[in-house]
Image (cartoon, rainbow, N blue to C red):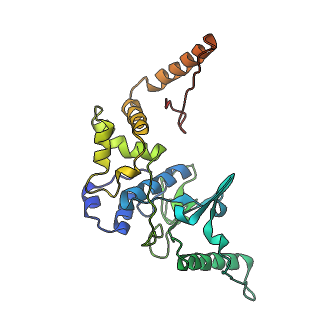
Amino acid sequence: MAIPLSAAAAAAATTVAEKMKIHLPLHVGYATRGEATEALHLALLRSAGSDCKIDSGRSGKDRVTLRCPSSMKPVKGARAKWRALDLGDFACPQKEGEGYIAHRNRRMVELEEFAESQGHCGFKAVLVRGGSCDGGGAGGGGGSCGDSEPTWYFKIMDSGLNFKMHSDDCIVVGKATGRVARCLVKASAKADPSLSCASAIINITGDDSQMSIAMMPSKASMYRAMNKIKWEGEAFYEENWARLEVYLRDLRKLNNNVHVVLEKDEDNHFER
């Protein structure tokens, strides 16, 4: 569910928390998991120039945990692992009469606190699926009434925010890629179709922005994203790209010595 941003409100916000409330409002539902995580990536980039990463070990069908990339350990041939799990000095024995679920939940809270005390960034956001229009959902807020599709919400933390802040000494720098990059350049590209990539980057990384040029994708990626945005509203956009795919397939059949590769993005749209 897209929320229109107020330029005046964004300019008036001074702290990361205030900016995040504008870019990632409380009690807002999202139609898909991808839409919700994209909104969080955008909010972090615009508010603090930072980023997040999914903790697959603590995520499932109806719940997604996102942490600071610095707290996730790359594992060759597998998904990244939360670094706190390797802290050997941590112990949280089960109390007498304490149930399994209660102990598991308490252990997770204490492990997160212990990890922060050991210098790990404590950023965390929890995305949950489910809820209702009266605000009684797992995430505390309503999506579109009558929507039969599952709705995703960011869980409200004890602080009253829908995320836990990055640590003060966290040095993670975000990077705009894929759909996030397209969303950043969308307003500029549609307002001025003749706008160059360099001008779009200047608009996005202006004086009032938390983003820097280092966070932007390559110029080639920017160029493709801007072209896709400029033409996506045209009546024959999908039809023309479909014709291109057929043409390239026929070209490959008729010319054995020609190497033809058609690259598409995650939405099955032409890329190059």
Up/down of 255 relative to 238, above or below: above
Q: Determine if residue 202 is in view.
A: yes
Who's the residue at 32% across and 45% down the image? 201
Up/down of 92 relative to 192, above or below: below
Who's the residue at 64% across and 14% down the image? 256
Q: State the residue lying farthest toward the bottom.
A: 96
What is the count of numbered marks? 0
Q: Is residue 2 left or right of residue 194?
A: right
Who's the residue at 47% across and 67% down the image? 163
Up/down of 223 relative to 203, above or below: above
Q: Position of residue 196 (x, y in %)?
A: 30, 35
Q: State the residue lying farthest toward the top.
A: 254
Toward the viewer: 184 or 143? 184
Q: Position of residue 151 (x, y in %)?
A: 54, 54
Up/down of 139 relative to 222, above or below: below
Toward the viewer: 223 or 186? 223
Toward the viewer: 258 or 55? 258
Q: Position of residue 149 (x, y in %)?
A: 57, 49
Q: Position of residue 68 (x, y in %)?
A: 52, 64
Q: Determine if residue 147 is in view.
A: no
Who's the residue at 53% across and 36% down the image? 265
Q: Quadrant of residue 190?
A: top left
Q: Is residue 85 left or right of residue 71?
A: right
